[in-house]
Amino acid sequence: MSLFITSLNSGSNGNCYYVGNDTEAVLIDAGISCREIEKRMKRLGLFIEKVKAVFVSHEHSDHIKGLPVLVKKYQLPVYITPLTMRRGGLIFDEHLLKSFIAHEAVSIGQLSIIPFPKFHDASDPYSFIVSGNHICVGVFTDIGVPCNHLKHYFKQCHAAFLEANYDEEMLEKGNYPFHLKKRIRGGLGHLSNKQALELFLSHRPHFMSHLLLSHLSKNNNSPELVQNLFNAYAENVRVVIASRYQETEVFHICTSEILEAIPVSHRHTKRPLQLSLSFA
């Protein structure tokens, strides 16, 4: 058994990530419209009927703007903390509303989803690990600094969506106002290319097969720059840029340590150690 992953969109204009097996899948965030989610999944040969839940990382509009229509149309359970829902101004039918607790696994069929807190300038922000049949996939974006939780879970990933938001020199020399530059690099904003690379080099497991670099800034980063930066150190890990304009291919993650892109028309859990809530 394996897992299938794709980024349906990644960037400040909208974020939505798919992780699934043969029979069920989850979405992490729905920051593009329901119509776009449907269209992109159809182009990839993915069936939206296999999506059994949506997990929400935080309330910023590029992560939630497609949620209300998607959840209502497909009657999907939405896993969200009360504070995130309140700050996002979201309302869902009571029977669809679910919550979660840090480091406690949520079972969706044969998938297990573990949320953990992160540093970001939102009310109650989380990242997620999705696993099935001893395969782990991390969704790690909108992170101010790599905390101990992130390092711990990153070490368990066969594949990961990892934020590489900005190039430090491009941000410094760019035309963003000082307060916005400070917000981005101030510990509650986003990961730089350098921070993401340091995490990758220090904590990637030997069995990691794929890294999808995500949430690249339109103005303060370059896909070519960050691709070349990571390729120099990738060794046996395939590095892919998750686009802010279109979906990626569907990637097949399996325990044989081989990752390949395939046209999908079809296609648990060793739970990570729980940690106390402390950051570094």
Image (cartoon, rainbow, N blue to C red):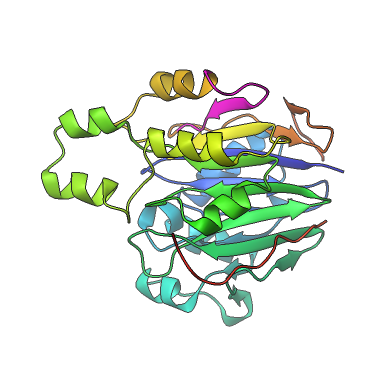
Whether the magenta-drawn stretch holds residue 236 is answered as yes
- Of residues 125 and 87, the one nearer the viewer is 125
Does residue 49 lie above or below 174 as drawn? below
Asked whether 214 falls inside the magenta stretch, the response is no
How many badges with numbers are in the image?
A: 0
The answer to whether residue 8 of the structure is visible from this angle is no
Where is 16 relative to 64, above or below?
above
Q: Residue furthest bottom?
A: 94
The percent coordinates of residue 139 (x first, y second) are 57, 49
Q: Is residue 5 above or below residue 52?
A: above
Image-based side of 94 in relation to 60, left or right: right
Outermost right residue? 1
Region in magenta: 232-243
Query: Which residue is found at the position 59% from the left and 24% from the top?
Result: 234
Residue at 59% from the left image edge and 34% from the top image edge: 211
**In screen coordinates, is 3 left or right of 188?**
right
Q: Looking at this view, is 224 or 229 the one in front?
A: 229
Rendered location of residue 142, percent (x, y): 41, 50
State the image quarter where residue 267 is shown: top right
Q: Quadrant of the N terminus?
A: top right
Residue 279 visible in the snapshot: yes
Q: Quadrant of the C terminus?
A: bottom left
- In the rendering, at what x and y percent does residue 241 appear? 51, 28
Closer to the camera, 31 or 178?
A: 178
Residue 180 image point, x, y percent? 19, 47
Q: Quadrant of residue 210?
A: top right
Q: Give me the residue at 14% from left, 50% from top.
A: 179
Main secondary structure type of the part rendered in magenta: loop
Which residue occupies 59% across, 44% down? 38
In the image: residue 111, left or right of residue 14: right
